[in-house]
Amino acid sequence: MHALLGENGAGKSTLMNVLYGLHQPDEGEILLRGEPIHIGSPREAIGMRIGMVHQHFMLIPVMSVAENVVLASEPRKGALLDRDGAEARVRELSERFGLVVNPRALVEDIGVGQQQRVEILRVLHRGADILILDEPTAVLTAQEIAELFKVLRALTAEGVSVIFISHKLREVLEIADRVTVLRRGRKIDTVSANGATEASLAKLMVGRDVLFRVEKQATEPGAPILEVEDLEVEDDRGLLALRGLSLQVRAGEIVGIAGVDGNGQSELVEAITGLRVPLAGHVRVGGRDITGAGVRDALAAGVGHIAEDRQRRGLVLDFTLAENLALREYRRPPLSRFGLLSPKRMDAQARPLLEQYDVRGGQPATLGSSLSGGNQQKVVIARELAEDPQVTIAAQPTRGLDVGAIEFVHKQLLEQREEGRGVLLVSLELEEIRSLADRVLVIYEGRIVAELPPDASDEELGVAMLGGKVRAA
Amino acid sequence: MSTPALGGGGEGPGTLTVASRLSGYLRGGGVFVPIITALFAFIVGGVVVLAAGANPIDTYKAIFDGSGLNWLFPWVTGDDRSLAALNLQQTLILTTPLILTGLAVAFAFRAGLFNIGGQGQYLVGTMASVYIGSSLGGTPAFLHIVLAIAAGCAAGAVWAGIVGVLKATTGANEVISTIMLNWTALYVGTYLFGLGGPLQTSDPTQQSIPVSNDVLQSARLPVFWGDPELQGLHIGIFIALAVTALFWVLLNRSVTGYEVRAVGFNPDAAEYGGINAGRNYVKVMVICGVFAGLAGALDVLGWQFRVATNDIQVTQVGYFGIAVALLGRNTAFGTALAALLFGALINGTSVRNLDPTIFEPELATNLTFIIQGLIVLFVSAPVLVTMLSRGRLFRRRKPMPKPEVLSGG
C-alpha cells in the first residue's frame, strides 16, 4: 500500500489522472510491471488492470448496487442484463474482500461509506489489481474510515496494490507501507511509513517545520460578547434542529463546539450570523439583540462568519477576488457611492488584504475559482477579519486544507483571541478544538449537553458527543 | 438517506443555475467563440440552401445585399447606393427592438434567470404604447412620446414583475411562468384589438379590421434618416444604444448589478453577503420587462403606428431576443452586435428584398429561423464551445508515442 501525500495543488490528482488515462503526459514515461506503457484513456487503463475511485463518486443513484457494479461490463443473458448473475458476482466479490453491501439496495438509499464500497467493488469487478483511491476519507466518518482501512488491508492481503492519495498525515501513517511526498509537482521523497512521524512528513510536505501544538498565550477572558439564550431553530426540512440552546462567548476566549455532524451545528451558525430566523430565544452581541435581524445587522453588530463551505457560501467563485472581498461592504462608501461601485477603490481595498493574508497567486482581478482551497479560505478570512468583528463564528475553518494552511488559519483565530475578541469554533475535528479552544461545549441533538476543558479525554468527549450517557451511568 | 455526493460534491446537475450552466460559454474565448458559433450556423444553413437546390454563396450574397449592409462599402454608388440605404434603414429598424429584447434576456441570464418572456413583455409594451400614443390628443409632441414610451416600459415591467414575484414567493419556475404569460399577452391583445374588442379602432370605415387606433402624429418618433413617408429610420436606434450603455453601467458598475451577478453566480454566497435573492429576482425581472416593453414602445411609435391582431400573432421579436442574448454572450455590446446580425438576416431574407431567382424568399425566411435555432443549439450544447475554448479544433494534438515504443520493452 503506497500513499501519495502532498499539499493542495501539489499535483497528486494530476499524477493520478495521468495514470488513469484522463490526462496525457507532456513528457516522461510510465512503467507498468517493468514495461513502458501509454495510457490513452480510462478504458485502456482498465484494460491494464488499473482502477480508480474518485473523490466524488460516479454512481447512478436510481440503480441498484449490483447494476452499478457491473455497469459497462455487464453479464448478459442474450440481449438482457443477467441480474442474478450480476448479484452473484457482487456477492462473490464482497465475500472475498470483506466488502459487505446489499447488492439489491438502490445506491441512493445507502450511506456514503457504502457507496464508496460500491465504487471499489466496481473497480475490482473489472479485474483491477492496482487500485487508486483519491482522498477516500474526505467524505467518511471516523467509523467509516476504520472500516475502509479494514477493507484496504484485506485487499492488499489478496495481492491488490493500493495507491492512497491523502493530505491527512495520521491516516497515511496508519495505513500505508510507503509514502511518497509531492510538493509543487515534484517528488520530494519516498519514505517507509515505519519510522516516519507526522512531524517528519509535514516537514517534507511543506518544506519547513510545522507547529502541531499551537502556542497559546494565557489570557483572562473578559465580559461576554456573544450570548445565545434558549435558541430554537428549525432546519430546512422544518424539523427542530436547536432545542433551547444557550451559550456564551467571552472576550478573549475561543469556545469550541464539538459534536457529531448534524446535531444542529449548521443551524446554530446560521442563526447567529443572521442567515436563519430562530423560532424562539435570543442572540445578543455586545448586549445588542440581533435575533432574526438578518445578515447585515449581525455583521454591523460585530459578527464575523467564516462559512462552513467556502465554495458554496463563502465565495462567489466567478467573481474576482476584489469583488469577493467587497461582498460585506459593497453597499457602503468608499466602495460605492450613490449606487455606483468604484472598481478602483475595490481594487485598492483588495491589494493590501491579499498581501497581508498571503493569498498566493491572487491579484485583485483573479477569479475566485482559480485559487486553491487554502488560498480561497485565506480570502474568506481576510474579508471577515477586515470587518474587525467582535466575535468570529468559524465553522469548520480548516476543512479540506493542508497543514500549512491549517496552521495559518489557527494562527489567525488565536490572534483574535489575544486581541480580546471572541471566537466560536465549530469543528468536527476534535484535535482542532482541543488545541485551540479554551472551553469545549458538546452539542447533541440541538442542545449543549456538556462543558469540558480542552484536555478532557477522548472518551469523555466521545461519550458526551453521543448523548452524555456518562452522566446517567 | 440522501446522497449529495453522487452528483459530484453538491455541484450536481440539479443544483446548477442557468448562469453556471452557461458560464463555460459565457467565459470561454472572448469574441472568438460567438463568431465561430455564428459561422458554424451559417455553414450548416448553407448546406440547407444547397439541399434546396440553390447556390449558398449567391444566396448569402443576396441576403447581405438585401440587408443593406453593402451601403457600408464606398464602391456601391448611384441607384444601388440609394437602394442599399433604404434596405439598411429597414435593417436598423428591425435591429432596434432586437437589441432591447436581447438585453431583456441577457440581464435575466446574468441573475441566473432564464427569461423566455421577452415576447409577452414586448407585446404588452406595444399595447400600452399604442393606447397612450393614440389617445391624449393635444399633448405636446415631446411629452406625448415620453408618456407613450413610459407606458410601454411600465406594462413590460408589470408583466415581467409578475414572474419575479411568483418566483420569489412560491418558487415558481420562471421558464414556465414566462411562457404562460407570453400566451396570455397574445390573447389579451387579440381580444383588445380584435373585432368588437374594447380597443379596436374607432374609425367607422375600418370596423371590419382587427386593429388599434393609429398613433397620433404628436407621439410618433422623429425620423432622422430617409423619408418619413417611406418608413425611414426613427431615433429609436439611439434610444436602444443608450440603453445598451446603461445596461453595461448597471450590470458592471452599480450596486444593483453587483447583487444581480452575485445572485446569478451563487445565490448562497449572495445571501451570506446580505442580499435577499427573492427581492433580487423581482428587481431583475422588472428591469428586464422595462427593456422588452421599451422595444414594443419603439416599434409602435417608430414605424408600425398601430397594433393589429395578426401582427401580435406572427411577430417573433421577443423570441429572437433569446438567440440574440446567447450569441452576444449576455454582454451589452455583444447583444447589440448580435441584434444587428439578426436584424440584417431577417430583413435580407424578407420577400421584398431577396431575389426569388437566387433563392425563394419564402424558404429564406425559414433559413433565418434555422440559423437562429442552430445558434441556440450550439450555445446550449456546450460540446462545440468547450472544444473551441480549449483550442482543440485548431491546436494539433500531441504526437502519440510511436508503436515501437509500445512493443519494445
Image (spheres, coloured by chain):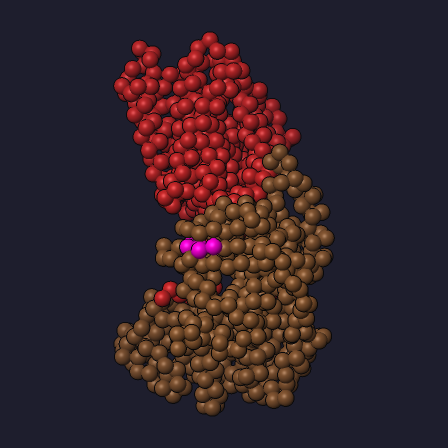
Chain colours: A brown, B red
Question: Who's the residue at 44% across and 81% down the image?
Answer: A147
Question: Who's the residue at 39% across and 42% down the image?
Answer: B169
Q: Dividing the picture into quarters, in which one does residue A445 lie?
A: bottom left
Across and down, in percent, residue A271 comes to: 48, 53
Question: Quick check: B56 left or right of A390?
Answer: left
Question: Quick check: A313 left or right of A324?
Answer: left
Question: Who's the residue at 59% across and 67% down the image?
Answer: A438
Q: Is residue A175 above or below residue B80?
A: below
Across and down, in percent, residue B369 comes to: 42, 41
Q: Dividing the picture into quarters, in which one does residue A455 lie?
A: bottom right
Q: Is residue B361 visible?
A: no
Q: What quarter of the picture does the N terminus of chain B occupy?
A: bottom left
Q: Is residue B170 visible?
A: yes
Q: Is residue A101 above or below residue B218?
A: below
Across and down, in percent, residue B285 comes to: 46, 37
Across and down, in percent, residue B65 comes to: 53, 33
Question: Quick check: A18 left or right of B133?
Answer: right
Residue situated in front as seen by the camera: B220 or A413: A413
Residues in magenta, as a range = A229-233
Q: Is residue B223 above or below residue A242?
A: above
Q: What quarter of the picture does the C terminus of chain B occupy?
A: bottom right
Residue situated in front as seen by the camera: A335 or A102: A335
Is residue A230 a member of the stretch shown in magenta? yes
Residue situated in front as seen by the camera: B238 or B176: B176
Q: Residue furthest top?
A: B138
Question: Who's the residue at 36% across and 29% down the image?
Answer: B312
Chief SS of the magenta region: strand
Is residue B19 a member of the stretch shown in magenta? no
